[in-house]
Amino acid sequence: DGGITQSPKYLFRKEGQNVTLSCEQNLNHDAMYWYRQDPGQGLRLIYYSQIVNDFQKGDIAEGYSVSREKKESFPLTVTSAQKNPTAFYLCASSITRRGGYTFGSGTRLTVV
Amino acid sequence: AQTVTQSQPEMSVQEAETVTLSCTYDTSESNYYLFWYKQPPSRQMILVIRQEAYKQQNATENRFSVNFQKAAKSFSLKISDSQLGDTAMYFCAFMKHSLDSSNYQLIWGAGTKLIIKP
């Protein structure tokens, strides 16, 4: 079945470390997105990519970086510059406006 | 800029009752798409229903239906015969229908927490 796979499900980061969250899709979608969700809050856009080798900053890109070397993959790196990275991270993809987004199951990142 | 407002932070109803979640949006666009997403305690984001602004008929999906009032810029979600499994956060979202752009960004509301009580 087609879908989006996010890994790991839970991730722990020490202060000053960079960590990378994986997002892979086999839906042949062109556009991919990373969102951050804090407890009881809505979704905030970190980065998005509409095509391979191109990506754009969202509303809260500081402290994060992405790459889009393959259509299927859109990894997110949370750098040490992100001072408050503890949150739930959701990856999504889309192919048409009418279809909306398909989401992965998320990664819970905790700073220890 | 487009905005989406969900004025009810939390609602609770008894099982089998009908509940309506409100959503209003602000846009100068004439063509767009509207969505309701559900996020249960598992935190998986699930598409509930979608509406295309150029269609006057309200979308329905089994127990879920919308009341789309384009002039009022209102897009409410009605859940009939509510079930315990409907307990979740519900997010309203808006997407522009710009033919000259491949930008498919969704604009999100803050969400409504819905609790179905047994």
Image: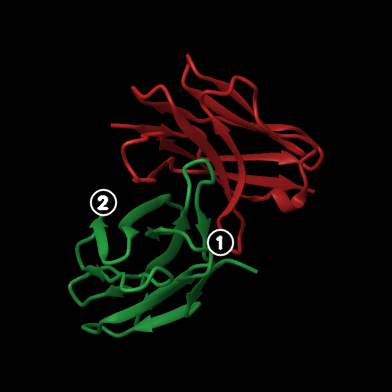
**Three-letter code for the amino acid on which mark 1 is drawn:** Arg
Between B88 and B49, which is closer to the camera in this rendering?
Answer: B49
Residue drawn at x 23%, y 76% as measured from the top left? A79
In the visual, does B105 lie left or right of A92? left
Q: Nearer the viewer, mark 1 or mark 2?
A: 2
In the visual, does B86 lie left or right of B47? right
- Residue B115, image x, y percentages: 66, 47
Q: Colour of chain A?
A: green
Q: Quadrant of the N terminus of chain A?
A: bottom right
Between A85 and B59, which is closer to the camera in this rendering?
Answer: B59
Quarter residue A19 falls in: bottom left
Quarter residue B114 falls in: top right
**Image height check: is B100 above or below A52?**
above
CA separation in Å, label 1 and label 2: 22 Å
Residue drawn at x 54%, y 27% as measured from the top left? B75
Count neighbours of disc 2 (C-alpha within 10 A) and say few if under 14, some if 14 to 19, many if 20 or more. few
State the residue position of label 2: A59
State the residue position of label 1: B43
Residue drawn at x 19%, y 62% as measured from the top left? A62
- SS for tag 1? loop
Residue drawn at x 41%, y 66% as measured from the top left? A89
Between A19 and A67, which is closer to the camera in this rendering?
Answer: A67
Q: Quadrant of the C terminus of chain A?
A: bottom left
Q: Colour of chain B?
A: red
Determine the chain carrying the residue at label 1. B
In the visual, does B114 lie left or right of A72? right
